[in-house]
């Protein structure tokens, strides 16, 4: 790959840093470590300025036309399952959802708001026949049709779209970051809140967690969180089915079943 050759010639050592796309590397030279990524989201500069991702050092366009970003390499680890309940997770998510700077940046990138209608159309178009054979999925799709959220798009915020604990990075210096912004959108913040609460926070602690985040646990919020968690879970089921990872798919079918049966009156 051209990018690798270029950095090798400049005397850097490069190691794959994983990532779903396989386009991330750790580069090291004279004790300096950088996290390099090809075709990173242009939004990364704004996220860096807000302290939400590790600091952006530079952006370069290479001869292939691709853009490479370099960020400070942070030694650290992902948050554990239980750490997702912590106050600092709620605080960072609130900072993201409240940021007018980030929202305006996405608007300048001409990003259109993602409404429930758009999400439902997209999921309906993407489901395979095999996934549709599952009763839980068919029942969930009926639920989605019948319970469409009605939040005015003026209240939409920047949404991360994949708040899995693997995307929360805690550095050796106790700095918390939310990384992997490939799914960022302008949408209802209940997309992030629902998935995080249903996955990581026991229900008797929702009120307290949302209180730290700074929002009331209203019936309307509960309805929106459930709707968006259901639609995201169906998307994950479909993804695992495509990857032929059936054990994971079954885990998410069970998760979907539990969310569907949670508070059946909403």
Image: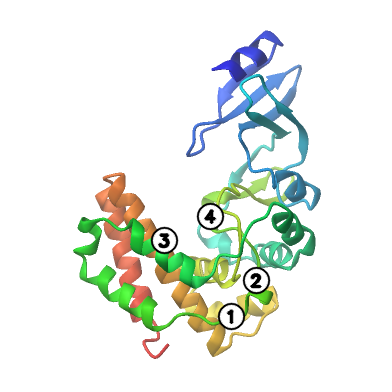
For label 1, the residue is 151
Q: Position of residue 158 (x, y in %)?
A: 66, 62
Q: Quadrant of the N terminus?
A: top right
Q: Quadrant of the C terminus?
A: bottom left
Label 4, label 3: how far apart the Cα atoms are: 25 Å
- Badge 4 marks a residue whose secondary structure is helix
Q: Nearer the viewer, residue 131 or 172?
A: 131
- Labelled disc at residue 165: 4
Label 4, label 2: how far apart the Cα atoms are: 23 Å
For label 2, the residue is 156
Mark 4 or 3, closer to the camera: 3
Answer with the quarter of the image where residue 235 lies: bottom left
For label 3, the residue is 122
Q: Residue at x 53, y 55 (%)?
A: 165
- Badge 2 marks a residue whose secondary structure is loop
Label 3, label 2: how far apart the Cα atoms are: 19 Å
Label 3, label 1: how far apart the Cα atoms are: 19 Å
- Badge 3 marks a residue whose secondary structure is helix
């Amino acid at each position: 790959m051209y990018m690798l050759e270029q950095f090798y010639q400049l005397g850097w050592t490069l190691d794959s840093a994983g990532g779903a796309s396989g386009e991330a590397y750790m580069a090291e030279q004279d004790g300096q470590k950088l996290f390099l990524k090809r075709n990173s989201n242009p939004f990364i500069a704004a996220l860096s300025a807000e302290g939400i991702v590790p600091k952006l050092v530079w952006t370069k366009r290479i001869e292939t036309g691709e853009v490479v970003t370099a960020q400070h390499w942070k030694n650290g680890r992902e948050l554990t399952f239980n750490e997702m309940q912590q106050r600092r997770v709620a605080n960072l998510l609130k900072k993201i959802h409240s940021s007018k700077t980030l929202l305006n940046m996405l608007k300048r990138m001409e990003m259109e708001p993602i409404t429930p209608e758009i999400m439902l159309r997209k999921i309906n178009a993407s489901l395979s026949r095999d996934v549709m054979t599952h009763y839980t999925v068919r029942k969930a799709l009926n639920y989605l049709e019948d319970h469409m959220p009605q939040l005015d798009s003026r209240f939409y915020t920047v949404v991360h779209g994949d708040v899995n604990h693997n995307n929360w990075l805690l550095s050796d210096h106790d700095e918390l970051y939310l990384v992997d912004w490939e799914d960022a959108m302008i949408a209802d913040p209940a997309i992030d809140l629902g998935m995080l609460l249903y996955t990581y926070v026991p229900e008797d602690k929702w009120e307290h967690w949302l209180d730290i985040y700074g929002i009331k646990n209203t019936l309307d919020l509960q309805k929106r969180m459930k709707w968006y968690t259901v639609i995201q879970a169906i998307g994950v089921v479909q993804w695992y089915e495509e990857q032929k990872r059936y054990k994971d798919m079954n885990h998410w079918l069970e998760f979907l079943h539990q969310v569907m049966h949670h508070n059946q009156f909403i």
